[in-house]
Structures are given as structure tokens and as C-alpha cells.
Image: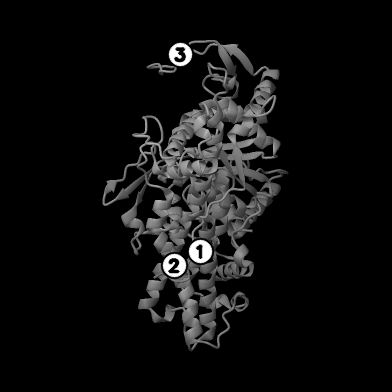
Amino acid sequence: MTIFKDFTRRLTAAAQSIAADAGMADLDTSRLVVEPPRDPDHGDLASNAAMVLAKPLRAKPRELAERLAAALADDPDIETVDVAGPGFINLRLTDAYWHGTLAALLAAGKAFGRSEIGAGEKVNVEYVSANPTGPMHIGHCRGAVVGDALANLLDAAGYAVTREYYINDAGAQVDVLARSVYLRYREALGEVIGAIPEGLYPGDYLKPVGAALAAEYGETLRDMAEPAWLPIVRAATIDAMMAIIRDDLATLSISHEVFFSERSLTTGDPNAIETAIAGLAERGLVYQGRLPPPKGKLPDDWEDREQTLFRATEFGDDIDRPLKKSDGSPTYLAADIAYHADKLRRGFQHMIDVVGADHGGYVKRISAAVRAVGGDDVDFEIKLVQIVRLMQGGEQIKMSKRAGDFVTVRDLVDEVGPDPIRFMMVFRKNDAQLDFDFDTVTEQSKDNPVFYVQYAYARTCSVFRQASSEVPDLDASPTALAGADLSALVDEGEIALVRRLAEYPRVVEASAEAREPHRIAFYLHELASDFHAHWNRGKELPQLRFINQTDSESTLARLALVHAINLVLSSGLAILGVRAPEEMR
């Protein structure tokens, strides 16, 4: 139980006692909140209890707050309870309570912060899902990191998480890629192919794929007509591109349990897409009709024709949506309907799709489709990830995939390492644009957030190395630290660090419920800042230093605090997929 849940329980009991005195059998306390105060000077905890319970208890908020405060006044864990403004309740807890909180953290060890709010429920997180047309570039990177950190976060919150990649291996773009590779295949056979025709992929990364085809098939493919060689080249190309993509993701320690092929939805008789459309049609959700022309300038591909439409407006969309193109092939939406229906068949009632911000216009239609196939009980969410601007020397680095001139994920990892990438990609909320500045992430200063947090962890490790050297006979094992007398921790800076540590389980749960891993990065930065500040106080005030060779009791208590900081930093960094280094050089 977090401290916030603990005191929510205590305030709820006090409110229910007041309700019972008034003859009320049931009191809805679901809106009662206990949280950190906005201003630390107001205390350790703040609650809106009187504000939200005044109406059902037929009391004035301020007067109810006074009664609740009086009910808590004798609580041995509360040092002071004050009423502020119209009826907010501020609590300041005793040092003994914080010592007990730290002891509980140490007893939990590496499990501290993990939650069971997910109750083992299955959740599917689909992320990256980049078209298999080349190496991963910086445009894919943020969605990959956000999705992976979100999956780790949900795992820490007690969900059974499946990490999934949707391979877009159907449609025109993979045929264009296959034709591009076919040119490289002919080149590998010694043919002079000249300039790559406009519209094809000119990147040199396709040359090894063409060479591999030449080695396997020799002249055979060149003697075939396109309808014969295209599926062969396409399959080999997709396999080669996915191998590159998997390797690129591995440089960021990202892996998926499931790789789902879009093309698999088009096989079989009937195939999955046809089955999904038929299922909607049986419920009267598909009809033949015409759509009104879009507002503004008409797109070049606009066709005023009768077509197969999904009644998306019945599920919150702005207009009904086409399910078939003019040539009879399925639309992207039709494939996505079949794909999400497949997820539902696999038992996923919680589904999260992490996609680029350029998919913003697609949110309503796919949300409508998932509701149509899964019902209102399906928990489906799309996380839009804004673009990343790659900066260096104050200027933006441009990239273009078709031109073959782009910054790959591997380039970025080789330049700065995986940790700055993973941390910085979640150091802003996913729907806010992010500047990734080479100059900042390579600095060893407090202006570099990932360095600042990792350095805090490394400092905790250095304290134990120093303790081993200066007081070699002191047992500083986790077991000994868990049994330390923590009453020696009385300095306000020490208690403030315990308060910050106590917030961690709440941060994990709130971050998981909001699907926002950036909150973990923000919290770690705040904890690191608190620790560095306390470290610097020890330089000026020798009595606050972690190791005192003449006082083993205070040394053990302070080492216990440092160990707790170490545990939480390590846990949070693991959620973000960032290393916790024992030394920084």
C-alpha cells in the first residue's frame, strides 16, 4: 500500500464515521484524493476530502474539514493537520512514519514500486510497425522507444504484456521496393542499370539484397516476366528488410514477441479481411452508398462513385468509411478492422497502438472500427507520437528515405549510444514535438538529463565502494541495511529524500493508468536532483556525510537511505530501458 492509499483509507474511515453519526449508511468516497501538495511548505500530504464530501454530508467544506482534522489529530503518525483555504486538508507526518516507510521500501527491495493494478490482464502494445522498406531511421525511433517503455511500464503495473509489430507487407509500397531490389539484382549480375528511375528506392542498402538474389537464383529471375519474379523478390526483400529492422531495434534493446504480417490477412478463402467485412455486414454495418465530397480542394484520387461503406458514424466517426478501393482491393481500414479483430480473438481486451502523429486523422475511424468489432467493453487507445527534430550545432539535420539520404537508428546509436536515445525520447510527453540535440546529450553536465540521472545512480554505487574502503568491518549488505535503526535520519534533507522515494509506487501506477511513460523520466530526474543537492550539502556540512567512521549507527542508516535511492533509480531506469551504470567515466 502506498502512503497515499494509506491516508486515503484513514481519511475515508474518518468521513464514514461522521456519516454514521449523521445516520448515513453509505457514503461515496470515490472522489476523495490524497496527493503531494503543490507547495511542500504546506506539508507532506494534501486532500480534497472535505471539498468533495461536503454536499453529501450536508456540511460546509471548511467546517467538515475541521471535523476531519479533529478526527485525525490523535493519529500517532501525523505530526500536524491543518485546514487551508475553503477546506483543503494538509498533513505533515512524523519522522517515525517516514522511517517506517523507508524500512518497508528496503524490505521490498527490487519489488518496490511494482504494482498489481493490472491484475494479470492481457494488454497488446503495438509499436514501431514501420514499413519494411529500409533501415530504421530517426522518424521511427521515438515511437519505438515510447512503445517499448510503455510496455515495460504496464508490465511493472501487473499487466500481462505482449509487444507486437505489424508488418506492412501488403500494398503498393512493397511492390515498389521489390522493383527497386530487382534493379540491384540485375546490377549484381553485371548489368549497367544507370540512374535509378524516379519513384523507386535508390538507397545503397538494397545492394546486398540484390546480390543475395543473384547468388541464389543466378540468371533465373531475369528470364522471368514481372508477374513471376515479383512475388519471389518481394518475399526475399521483406525478409531482408525485417532482419535489418530487428537488428536496428536490438541496438536499442527493443524486441517484440509477435510480428504480424498484413499479407496474412489476405490469404485463405475467405480471407480474414473478407470475413471481417462479412461479419459487419451481417449486423447491418456495411452498405453500398456514395460519400459526399470532402470539404475544400478535392484530392487527386477523389472518385464520386458508389462503394462499400462501413457505418463508422454510428461509433463516433465523422463520416462513414470505404472498405474497398475502386479496383475491389481492401482499403487500409478494412485490413485494420481484420487485424484488430484478430487481436480480440487472441484474447486482448486492452489494446494500445503507438503511431506517428501523421496518423492523427486516422484515430476516429480505427477507434470506431474497434468498437464495432469488439463492443464498448474493449479498452482501445491510440498514442500519437510527435516528430523528432534532430539537431546539431543549432541546425536541424534533414532526412529523406526515398533519396537514400537519412539518419538511421544505427547511426544515432553509434554516435551517442542507446541510453541518451531511450531517455530523451521519453523526456517529453509523446504528443509534444521533441528536439534531439546531439550537443546536449553528449554533455557531462546537469543540462544533460540522462547523464544527470545515471550519474546519481553511479554516485550511490560510489558511496558503497567508499564505505567498503573506509569502514571495511561494517556489514552493509541488503539484509543489514533492511534491519538498520533508521531513527538516526533526522535531517530535513534526508526526510525529503524519503518523501520523494515514497512517491515512486504512486508514480508507477499513475503513469501506467495514463499510459504515459514520460512521467517516470520526470520523476527520476526529480529524484536525482534531490540526491545531488543533498550530496552537495554534505560537502559543506560534514555531519551530513553518508559515512562517519566513528558512528556506525548513523552510517548504516544513511547507507540504507542511499541503497533505497539506488533501488528506485535502478527500477525506474529499467522501465525506460536505460542502463544503471555503477561508474561514469
Q: Which mark is residue 293?
A: 3
Q: Earlier in the sequence, mark 1 or mark 3?
A: 3
128 lies above or below 298 = below
Q: Residue at x 51, y 76 (%)?
A: 558
User: Earlier along the polypeptide chain: callout 3 or callout 2?
Assistant: 3
Q: Nearer the viewer, residue 134 or 95?
A: 134
Amino acid residing under circle 1 = Leu
User: What's the residue type where badge 3 is placed?
Assistant: Pro
Is the N terminus in the top left, top right, bottom left or bottom right quadrant? bottom right
- Say which residue label 1 marks: 569
Please say if 406 is above or below 484. Answer: above
Residue beneath the point at 58% across and 83% down? 475
Which of discs 3 and 2 lies nearer the camera? The answer is: 3
Q: Position of residue 192 (x, y in %)?
A: 37, 36
How is this picture coloured?
one colour
Label placed on residue 268:
none
Q: Are marks 1 and 3 in contact (CB under 8 Å)?
A: no
> With 151 as the anchor, is 282 left or right in this view?
right
Residue 439's place in the image compared with 229, above or below, is: below
Instruction: Work out whether residue 277 or residue 179 is closer to the camera in this orientation and state it.
Output: 179
Tell me which residue sits at (67%, 35%) in the image.
344
Task: State the separation of the CA atoms marked 1 and 3.
Answer: 55 Å
Left or right: residue 90 compared with residue 585: right
Q: Is residue 155 left or right of residue 461?
A: right
x, y percent for residue 517 = 51, 50
- For the residue labelled by badge 1, is the local secondary structure a helix, a strand or a loop? helix
Crowd rating for badge 2 (residues with CA inside 10 Å; few <14, some 14–19, many 20+): many
Q: CA distance from mark 2 to mark 1?
A: 8 Å
Q: Residue 456, which numbered label?
A: 2
Relative depth, front residue between 328 and 226: 226
